[in-house]
Structure formats: structure tokens, C-alpha cells
Amino acid sequence: MGSELLLFYAFGAIAIVASLLVIAQKNPIYSVLLLIASFGALSGLYVLLEAPFVAVIQIIVYAGAIMVLFLFVVMLLNAPHEDTEHDLHLHPLLRGGPLRFGAALAVALIVELGWALTKDGGEAGAFPGGAVTSVSAIGRSLFTDYAFAFEVTSILILVAMVGAVVLARREPGTK
Amino acid sequence: MPDLNQYLVLSAILFGIGTAGVFLRRNSITVLLSIEIMLNAVNLTFVAFGRALGSADGQIIVFFVMTVAAAEAAVGLAIVIGLFRHRESLNPDVFTTLKW
């Protein structure tokens, strides 16, 4: 077993366990912190995939900016814990029909995944050599082929910023 | 060295965890976090396929997905703050009316 495979399994295990714990936690603060750990493991996977640019922006933008925004909101709201016994009566997915339907969908997903993995004849094997790793190549493609999408993205960010300010603003007159 | 299939399986597992989180949790912030898990699973798929095809397109699309995720987080959290002010709750089942 090569060291890359070992690292893949290590990072993959961290990502899966941390993500599972994210949705298992009662306290949103722990969820956010565990999600940062999951993003760190994913960043390691990007390094294994020879995509250092994505690995770096995963840490800076996702773990650094977006998760801090989540953490800020969680602390701002001083959010109450989930009310579990209240949930048990109210939760729509715990009724008989949706429960059985969801279980059937989950079984279908597992069967399909197993079928896709055991079916032989797939060409997708080892990665070829010659990955695009340089930031300059990515940047050249971003500002030539994808220039229009890049500019549209800036408008999207502006709209999101204005929208967030308007939505989170207190109504004038209310305290 | 891990191959494409292993990355795709890992991505599928992460996406499944995110989906389960969206449906099972009754906390708006955790639901948004689960959506982030799903977006990251898709990002992993993009980068793995970009690596397999030997092009930079996969990494560029990840860049755009991150931008959209940032916008979604900003607007989503603003909505959560607004809802919390009105109802003092984060449980999405409480928000059953569009206007009050």
C-alpha cells in the first residue's frame, strides 16, 4: 500500500467522521468547528489530487471566511439547543409513510452504489500524468475562457451582499 | 495511488451525509451546514474528474461553486437571523406561514 493511498484513507476517514459528527451534534457551535475539520481533510485530498490552488482557497475561503460567518451568526443568535422531545412529536419524517419511503430510497442508493462499484469493465482507473497544477494556467483560463462567468460572479457577490444587508436590517421603528 | 472510483465513492458518501443532515435536522443553521457538506462533496467530484481529464476546468468550476456558496451562506444566514428575530426559534417546522 503506497503512502498516497494511506493518506487518502486517512483524509477520507477524517472527512466522513467529521461530517457525520456535524449532523449528529446538538450544539451548532460544535457542528461548525467539526465542519472546519472536515474541510481541512478535504483540502488534504485536493493536495493529493495535485490541485494546490483549490486546496489553498478551500482553507482560506471556506474554512477561513464562510465558516467564520457561520460561527459569528451562531454566537450572535445565542441559539438554543434543539428541542428533541418536542421534535419527536412534530418531526414530519418520523411519520410512517415518509419513514418507509426514505428507507426505500436509502436501500436503492446503497444497491446502486454497490452495483456501480462491482460492475467491471469501467475505464476509470488510475489518473494519467500531467495534471494542471500551476496557478498561472488556471488564472489564464479563468480570465480568457471563463471571463464572462467571472464577471457575472462579481455581480452575484454584489447582489448577495446587498441582499444580506437588507434582510438582516432591523425594521425602522421596531427596537 | 487512489484512483478515480475511490474519490467518487468518498464524494457520494459525503453527499449522502449532507442530504441526511438536511432532512433529519431541525435546526436551520445545521441544515445550512449540511448544504455546505453537499457542495464540498460535489467540489471533490469536480476536482477528481478534472484531474482524470487532465484539464483545469474542474478547478475553475470549484472556484465558482465556492463563490456561490459564499453568497448562499450570506443570504441564508441573513434569513435565519430575520426568522429568529420574529419567532425566537431555529426550527424550520415553526415557520409555517409566509406572512404574519
Image (cartoon, grey):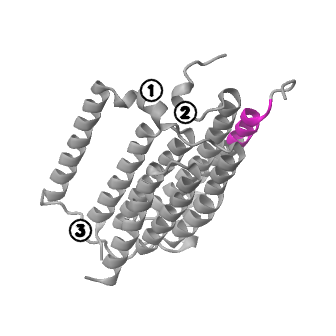
Tell me, yes or no, whether the two marked residues, 2 and 1, touch with CB atoms within 8 Å.
Answer: yes
Q: Is mark 2 on a helix, strand or loop?
A: loop
Residue at image mark 1: A90
Task: Report how far apart the C-alphas of labels 3 and 2 lie in the structure.
Answer: 45 Å
Q: What stretch is highlighted in magenta?
A: A159-170
Residue B93 included in the magenta stretch of the image: no
Whether residue A154 is visible here, answered yes or no, is no
Q: What element carries label 1?
A: helix
Chain ID at mark 3: A
Q: Residue at x 28, y 25 (%)?
A: A97
Q: Residues within 10 Å of mark 2 (few under 14, many from 20)?
A: some
Q: Which residue is drawn at 59% across and 43% down?
A: B72
Task: Report how far apart the C-alphas of labels 2 and 1 lie in the structure.
Answer: 10 Å
Quarter of the image with the C terminus of chain A in it: top right
Residue A111 lies, with reference to residue B48, above or below; the image says: above
Tell me, yes or no, whether the two marked residues, 3 and 2, touch with CB atoms within 8 Å.
Answer: no
Residue at image mark 2: B91
Q: Is mark 3 on a helix, strand or loop?
A: loop
